[in-house]
Image (tube, rainbow, N blue to C red):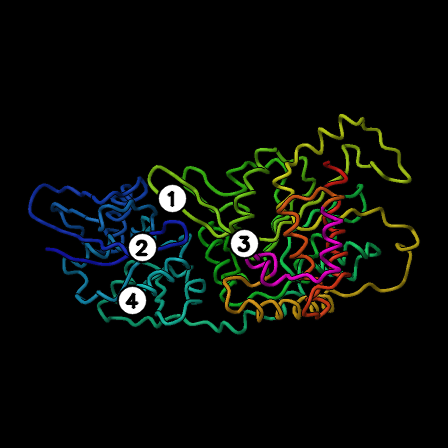
Amino acid sequence: MLSKVKTCVLHGLNGYIIEVETDISRGMPVFNIVGLPDTSIRESKERVRTAIKNSGFEFPLNRITINLAPASLRKEGSQLDLSIAVGILLATGTIKNKDLSKMSFIGELSLDGNINKIDGALPLIISLKDKGIEKVIVPYENKDECSIVEKIDVIPVKNLYELVMHLNDEISIKPWKIDISKLFKNENELYDDFRDIKGQESLKRAMEVAAAGGHNILIIGPPGSGKTMIARRLPSILPELTFDESLEITKIYSVAGLLKNNFLITRRPFRAPHHTISSASLVGGGRIPKPGEVSLAHYGVLFLDELPEFQKNVLEVLRQPMEDGHVTISRVNATLTYPAKFMFVASMNPCPCGHYGDPIHECTCSEREINRYLGRISGPLLDRVDIHIEVAPVAYKELGSNVMSETSRSIRKRVNEARKIQINRYSKEKIFCNAQLTSKDINKYCKLDNKCVKLMEEAFDNLGLSARAYNKILKLARTIADLDKKELIEVQHLAEAIQYRSLDRKFWR
């Protein structure tokens, strides 16, 4: 007796169809699973055996061989439980529906026959749809998450008995559907608003430029100057997520097991890890590789408060994802890639005590202590940060003012207009904002007139800028011109952009 059913396993965010071949033959009652299964799949033998019995079905006392094809691909995850159980029940004739070629099964079995929720269900469903599967059986608790995907029927089941009755046409379970349009409703209004911020107009402007062009930003200032408060409001002025962006973020959170009540993430992520974080937690990894903070911040904001407090080796691992927009994790058995296109936002004090350059409070740090403190941040990492801005403490006059600050809604309107200009400009390129411009793109889209060239030469000579910093200035000037709705970069745009690059030379030269 031979049966074949389909399931799926994940490698990173990519799913691969696995054909579960079940052979039941005469001989000693042995239950073997072959085809490079991991420990969780080998343990499924006892879960499957007990679940079938406790669901009221007979478990065959024969030689059972399960082959997970292709045998060259390592299989991980308990979501194969359901397909193994269905394969056995199909081979014994308990399930009478023989045509399951366009159907797939994912789910973990408990000992009483219930089908438990799994992590990573969404990317599994997307991969199955892309590979021609028309119908998929999923755990009932995964139904909303899986129903986001269109053009595939998602059948939610609660237990093994219910599934067998459905496959034998004794009961009918309709595909689960949700209205995706109702999920996107003014998500940006749920963030903290810029109107709550008193003063710090220069920092607000820098945040607007960063949001408009997707630029990374470093904020330097004394304690209590509002660095963290303003950084946490950055998502409120970013453009709203598209459905495709939302789907990609949700896939990452699904794999990480972080989808709770939100089966579709419609808000841009804001991740703020503690400075004690390890490099594996930041970029991803572990014995069973999982997405790290850089991937959880995909299409959102990664905020590192008190940047020099992070371990230097931890900060250095950020360089590759900041440059490439993805993270590659290599293991003996596989190489996994997770997306990591995030806006990097960091804040820091100018010295260990925080009062270097403060006109009111005296700095108690020695020059050696300051150099050691600032030396924790390498030049190559700084060159990957587009905007460096210094802020001062907010004056009492500004704190006590009754004048309302500009709202996030009005700032976001300008940001959206600038982003639309960039999307139209780069419609034939594989980029969507100025921060993604390559050196070749900069030569094409960031041309300077004679006045701008002269200003740039002076800045380059006086500030000792690197080649990467030179390119960052041109990208920033392009963004500022877009906010100003100007087709060409003008002197005032370039001058403002240069201001956002001078701080690293002040502190790190």
- Distance from Cα at disc 1 to Cα at disc 3: 19 Å
Q: Earlier in the sequence, mark 1 or mark 3?
A: 1
Query: Which element carries disc 4, helix, strand or loop?
Result: loop
Q: Position of residue 145 (x, y in %)?
A: 45, 62
Q: Position of residue 426 (x, y in %)?
A: 55, 67
In the image, is residue 450 part of the stretch drawn in magenta? yes
Query: Is 381 on the left-hand or right-hand side of 494?
Result: left
Mark 1 surroundings: few (<14), some (14-19) or many (≥20) residues within 10 A: few
- Distance from Cα at disc 3 to Cα at disc 2: 24 Å
**Tag 2 and tag 1, C-beta contact below 8 Å:** no
Mark identifier at residue 335: 1
Q: Earlier in the sequence, mark 3 or mark 4?
A: 4
Query: Which element carries disc 3, helix, strand or loop?
Result: loop
**Tag 4 and tag 2, C-beta contact below 8 Å:** no
Which residue lies under the disc numbered 3? 341
Q: Main secondary structure of the magenta part?
A: helix
In this orientation, which residue lies closer to the viewer: 10 or 85? 10
- Distance from Cα at disc 4 to Cα at disc 2: 12 Å
**Tag 3 and tag 2, C-beta contact below 8 Å:** no
